[in-house]
Amino acid sequence: MTAMKEHSAKNSGQAQIERLVRSVCGSLLDDLIFSMRDHLTQPGMLPPGDDISVRQPALVLAFDQCARRLKEHLAAMPLNEVSELRDWLPWHLAEVEDRHLLAAILEVATLDGFYNVDPAVFSAADPLDRLYLNHPELATHTDKDGLLRVANYNAQPQVLFHGGSAVPYHPFLRRHFDGNVNDELIQTLLGVASNGTAALRLALNEQHFMAASAFSAYFERDHWWGPPLSRETLDNRHHVGVTVHGDPKSGLMHEYPRLYVDWSMNKEGQKVVQIEELSDHPGSSRAGLRLVRYLHAIRDIEQGFFIHCDGAVRAYTNEQYEIRTSKNYMTGRESAARYRKVFRIDGIIDTDAWSNIAVRWFRGNLLMKEYLDGLAAEAGGGQ
C-alpha cells in the first residue's frame, strides 16, 4: 500500500469511528471534547484515572456519559461489526484489550475535535469570549493583540491562576501545537520579566479554563537551550540580510524543511530580526491551514541587548503555503491568511535570554539551533 493510500485509510477509519460515536452519543461527544480542552486532557489520556475523579469531576462525568451510551451500543452490535470496528482503529490501538476498547474508540473519536483549530483562536480580546465573561478584570489588562500584561498576576510556567481558575495559555503556545504547553519558553519569559526591567505579555486561552483545584502540573524531560552569543556579530550593523537554512533530509523525522532569518537596520539605528519556519510537522496542519511559527525582535546595538521580542503564528491556506515555499526570502504578515501573536516582551532582554527564547519558541526545529550555533561560532563564541 502506498503512503498516500495508508494515510487515506487511516483517516477513513478515524472518520468512521467518529461518525459512529457521534451517532450514538450526539452532543455528549461535543461536551466531552469541550471538557477535555478545559482540563488540558489530550485524547491519549483517556479514560480519566481514578485520581482525577475528585479534582476534575466535570471531565469524569462527561467521559462517563459518553462511555455509558457507547458501551450499551457495543453490547448490542453483532460480533462481526465489532471486529470491523476494531479494524478502523489506528495501528497503535489495533491490539487493544476488550476492557480498553471503549477508551480507544473515544480517543480516536475526539482527535479531530480536540486538535482542530477553532477560528476563535485567531480573535483577540473579544469581551464576549468565555474567559472574559467569567473574569472581566482580565480584559482590562489585555491589549488589542489579545496579550495579557502579566505583571501582578500569578503566572506560572504551565497556567495562570486567577480568581479560583487555572487558565491555560493560548493553544499556539503548545509544543508543535498539539502537545503540552511550551513551559520552558514561558519559564524563560517569566524569568526575564521577574527582575522588573522588562514587561511581559502572554496570550491566554480565551475559551477554556478549569477550577484551580483541578489543575495538576506535569513534568517533561526534553530540554532545549540556546547557545551563548557574542556581541561581535549581533551588534555589527553591516551583518544584515536573509539567511535560509534548509534540511536536505526533510521528511519523516525531519519535519522542518526550511528556516528564514532576516536581519535589517531600522531608521532608529536598531537591528531588527525576523525569523520564520516552514513546517511539515503533523501538528502544523489544522483545518485546511498550515501553522508556522514566527519571531520578531529588536536589538539596541549601542547598549548590546535586545529591547523587544514577540512570537506569533502565521496560518497559511494550502495555496498560500505553496507560494510561500517557492520563495527564499521573508514575506510580509499579509502573505498568510490568519495571524495571532502569542507573546511579547519589552525592556532589557540580555543576549543569552534571547537565545533561549528563540530556540524554545522554535522548539523541535533543529534548524533554529543550527542557526544559533552557527551565529555563535561565527563570532568566536561557543557552548
Image (tube, helix red, strand yellow):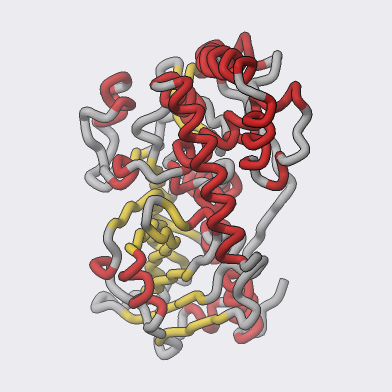
| Quadrant of the snapshot with the C terminus | bottom right
**Number of marks drawn:** 0
Q: Can see residue 59?
A: no
Q: Is residue 21 above or below residue 328?
A: above
Give the residue at x 66% y 83%: 377
Say which quarter of the image contains residue 43.
Answer: top right
- Residue positioned 54% across, 75% down in the render: 257
Residue drawn 55% across the image and 81% down it: 246
Vertical placement of 26 versus 194: above or below? above
Q: Is residue 189 above or below residue 300?
A: above
The image shows residue 338 at horizontal and vertical percentages of 29, 57
Please state which of residues 44 and 359 is positioned toward the viewer in this rendering: 44
- Quadrant location, the N terminus: bottom right
In which quarter of the view is residue 351 placed? bottom right
Q: Is residue 173 left or right of residue 373?
A: left
Q: Residue at x 35, y 81 (%)?
A: 264
